[in-house]
Amino acid sequence: MAHHVRTDYGDSEPLFPSKAAAFWYAVLLAGLIAAPYVLESYYLSQLVFIMIYAIVGVALNILSGQAGQVSIGHAAFLAIGAYFTAVSQKYGVPLVLYLPLAGIFTGIAGYLVGLPALRLHGIYLAIATLAFAFIVEEIIARWESVTNGNEGLMLPPPTVFGLKLGTEGFYYLCLLVTVLVILAAINIIRSSTGRSFMAIRDSETAARSMGIDTARYKTTAFALSAGITGIAGALYAHKMSFISPEMFSLSVSIDFVMIIIIGGLVSLRGAVFGAIFMIMADPLLIILKDKVPLWSDALTHGLFLPDTVTQAIQAGVLRVVNAPGLKSLIFGIIIIVFIIYEPMGLDGRWQRVKAYFKQFPLARQRAARPPRMFLKSERR
Amino acid sequence: MTFFDVKNLTVKFGGLTAVDNVSFGINEGEVFTIIGPNGAGKTTLFNLISRLYTPSAGQIVFRDEDVTRLSAQQIAGRGIARTFQNIELFESASTLQNLLVGRHRHSTTRPWQDILRTRKVRDEEVAHRRAAEEVMDVLRLQRYRDTTIGALPYGVRKVIEVARALCVGPTLLLLDEPSSGLNVEETNAMAEWILEINRRLRVTVLMVEHDMSLVSRVSNRVLALNYGKMMALGTAAEVQGHPDVIAAYLGT
Amino acid sequence: MLDFTQQLISGVALGCVYGLIALGFVLIYKATEVVNFAQGEIMMLGAFMSVTFITTLGLNYWLSFVLCVIAMAILGAIMERLVIRPILGYPQFSIVMATIGLGLVIRALVGIIWGTDDLRIETPFTDGVFTIGKLVIAWDALSIIVATILLCGALYTFFRYTRVGIAMQATSQNMLAAYYMGIPVKRMFSLIWSLSAMVACAAGILLAPITLVHANLGFLGIKAFPAAVLGGFGSIPGAVAGGITIGIVESLSGFYLPEGFKDVAAYIVLLAVLLWKPQGLFGLNAIKKV
């Protein structure tokens, strides 16, 4: 077990919880830097998607996990960042400018959304963000002069200082942005801004009584979250080379919320876990589609059931496995299972496993579940 | 200088007048207690002073400034801090983090500086930490420093509430029923702390209390409220002996 | 003027459907402070089940209606038991996400069981029209409006005058206290979900002749949100009033405003109302007492 001895207050919220953790993160970073030389292009591409989703996960973590504000319309911010990028690139703006500008522009949009959101709480806020997302999607579809409407926009490959960014170059760009975003998020969390977010999440009344201008901090959370998502949108636009309004629909917003639910609402690491899960889901599903009918076939034959029953079961299995809605079905079940059994998400599970090994054989089974609140007056 | 003055303070919720024409003044350095039966408007009065509610009429003056229309967060900035009757700590955070939030008033860094973690941010973090540690020393909370509030017992949480309010660095401290839910030992400890806060840290204390022994022990002056109206104002002994107060609240 | 009235009436009819779905939201919200994001999908499930009863099995329309509603009541209770019961008391965000998950599951299952084609049902009102002068009102539309009025009346009486209704209100205020008073809180939840599912089912069957039965019916449920929010999430008449308002706004903007406004009109109205009154038109302004 590692004991952390600190000798001065400056050490109190270090970037890495221990020297060992720093070491392992360095190893991870080295691995990620070496990836283009080791992995095939398919895996590299998946890594890029993971990074883009991780950036959005971090953005949602700041808004919902830290500051406790609900948003089920975040795809709108992704869209704003993506379209800003496409249009800027069309007008010859260099990447080094339009990438951060996409973030700033989307951040301003987030701030504007945050302003009316100040007076809304809980379900009203959720539905307002939903409404906002629908309106943005419609604006993008109708504003054809700028966005080309439903036909979508093509993006030429990104260039930095005249040099075309190939697959590796783009990968490194995404890696750089992801690392910077995560560092920024860590710095926010361990500063007075992050504590103010936490205060607003846990008790707005107490936060105000401690002198926190809750209005300003809520709009800041929205702006930050939107801005970061906007940058992810810029990267997303380049990754897909083509954007259209239907790529930023409600299901995308729900996918984003799933990232933090599966990963763990409160932790930053959870956002990354969630992103990995969401991106790995598609390949896994494809494998499942092939394997499950084979398994059910073997199983039913192994049980020596009559032929008619076996055929019926196989037909049923095939129907389920080939259904277009299979992904929704599995995601829906996963959401429900995670909320019931893993309220702290994958990160919570990770921490419990670590704690188990640390404390072995004295580990206690103390369930880390959110406290249940049964009074209406308690919830606010 | 008027340290703290409440003039004709009234608040109505629909047809109910929760606080009715209350006027009193607090001298710098004293411990002033408000007593009264449940529903008398004591916590409502606190909420008016800390500006979580808006008065229908009346004025609140603090250090010669009219603070009646300030917002709750501005009140903290003026040096008035409070605790809550039903504990409004940040449940998911540790004791230290709760106290550091109390230091918010002394924080001058803006979000962009926090993101970049500039020298100023780091220096301020150290200063905040030092201040929080000093408060923890006074109230003997060091062993709970990194424990999440959710895991702590009620008595400890009440003390942390006071600690967090102290981190604001207040000139006037509002304590809402500091001893409610505490046993005899804990109440004695709380009494000692209130006296230490008042005398050594030179903080003026305004508190709401039900425990009459605690009231007599620490208070300079007492105000009795009933149905939002003032019943008696004077020293603890005077108020406890007042016939109206005995009839409405204390019994014989 | 004639066009306007025509649009108004179809708006009211559509609005009644939104209102019925919003009613389902409000029922569950009043009892458990949970917003059931799967309400639209439940309505869709009801519509699909009616297809099985009416078209596949060839049963009489009214008999099928009743059977569907009863089946949905049972399904509603099952859903509550499996998904909501384990997470009672959890933060609102978690419960909302769980209902979103439930909605995804229902939508996928419907696609698996009934396929992805559009289906239709035969009703006694199909093709019938009612004319006042030059005004043409389809019987379908009229049936929705009449059914909504009847349902609202029934629910109002239920909540106001029966013990169960009052018990439900108690449960929504303070679960623990209701439990201690001998109210079977868990059974109340099953009941309210059943009731809400029944209302959604009825809405789906009434809507089926107008929109056909297809897998995207669930998205209508999302339109019902503005309706429920407008009504303030706390009152049944508010939900229906909100629904009718949204229906009228949509219908009129589809007719008078350029293309595209129809889809977002509801949301623009919603945001406008929330800016002015954050608790909805009829909602209660509540803050936590400290």
Image: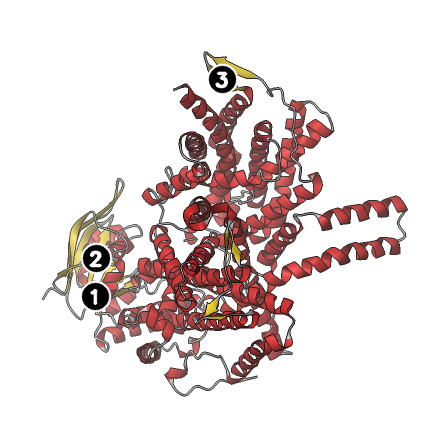
A330 left or right of A298 in image:
left
Q: Amino acid at mark 3?
A: Val
Per the image, label 3 sits on a secondary structure element best described as strand
Q: Is residue C9 above or below residue A296?
A: above
Residue C57 or residue A206, whichever sits in front: C57
> What residue did someone put label 3 on?
C136
Q: Is residue A295 above or below residue C242?
A: below
Q: Position of residue B16 (x, y in %)?
A: 26, 42
Q: Which chain is mark 1 on? A: B
Q: Position of residue C197 (x, y in %)?
A: 58, 37
Q: Mark 1 and mark 2: span between their CA atoms?
A: 10 Å
Would you call the spot at circle 1 few (<14 residues within 10 Å), some (14-19), or many (20 or more)?
many
Q: Position of residue A206 (x, y in %)?
A: 34, 61
Q: Residue at x 22, y 76 (%)?
A: B199
Would you call the spot at circle 2 few (<14 residues within 10 Å), some (14-19), or many (20 or more)?
some
> What residue did someone put label 1 on?
B78
Q: Is residue B100 visible?
A: no
Q: Is residue C230 above or below residue A218?
A: above
Q: Is residue B102 visible?
A: yes
Discs 2/3, front? 3
Q: Are marks 1 and 2 in contact (CB under 8 Å)?
A: yes
B244 left or right of C4 in image:
left
> What residue did someone put label 2 on?
B70
Q: Amino acid at mark 2?
A: Leu
